[in-house]
Image: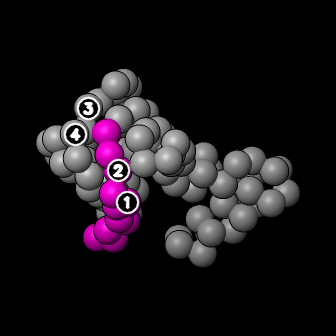
């Protein structure tokens, strides 16, 4: 089953030229310096504090560490984080 899924993903990304982040359900993270982070394609909020944000991903979670965090926008699959971003860590489960 895993090989079948890999073949379908390859077909969709290479031959049909669809964006890999959409087909593979990968997060898209856009940062502006250390001040803003815009995260798309997450699977849910796990933890939020003024110094840490954790978002569920397909195969684990994303942890962002920093200071003075504020959620400026939160939609079902998108988050705009503002504050002093010091570290982005992908943790596999």
Query: Label 1, on which residue?
Result: 88
Query: Label 3, on which residue?
Result: 70
Magenta highlight on residue 53: no
Residue 44: percent from left, percent from top = 29, 41
Q: Which residues are magenta?
A: 83-93
Callout 1 secondary element: strand
Query: Label 4, on which residue?
Result: 68
Query: Label 2, on which residue?
Result: 85
The image shows residue 69, relative to residue 75, as above or below, that is below
In which quadrant will I find the C terminus? Answer: bottom left
Disc on the earlier residue, 1 or 4:
4
The image shows residue 59, relative to residue 18, as above or below, that is below
Which residue is located at x 81 percent, y 50 percent?
A: 17
Residue 23: percent from left, percent from top = 62, 50
Crowd tier of the residue under label 4, counting other residues whose Cα lies within 10 Å: few below 14, some 14–19, many 20 or above? few
Measure the C-alpha gap from mark 1 to mark 4: 15 Å
Disc on the earlier residue, 3 or 2:
3
CB under 8 Å between callouts 1 and 4? no
Magenta highlight on residue 85: yes
């Amino acid at each position: 089953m895993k090989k079948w899924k890999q073949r379908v993903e390859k077909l969709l990304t290479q031959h049909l030229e669809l964006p890999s982040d959409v087909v593979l359900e990968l997060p898209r993270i856009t940062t502006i310096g250390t001040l803003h982070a815009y995260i798309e394609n997450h699977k849910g909020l796990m933890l939020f504090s003024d110094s840490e944000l954790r978002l569920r991903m397909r195969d684990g979670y994303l942890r962002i560490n920093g200071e003075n965090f504020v959620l400026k926008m939160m939609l079902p699959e998108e988050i705009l984080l503002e504050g002093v971003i010091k570290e982005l860590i992908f943790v596999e489960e």
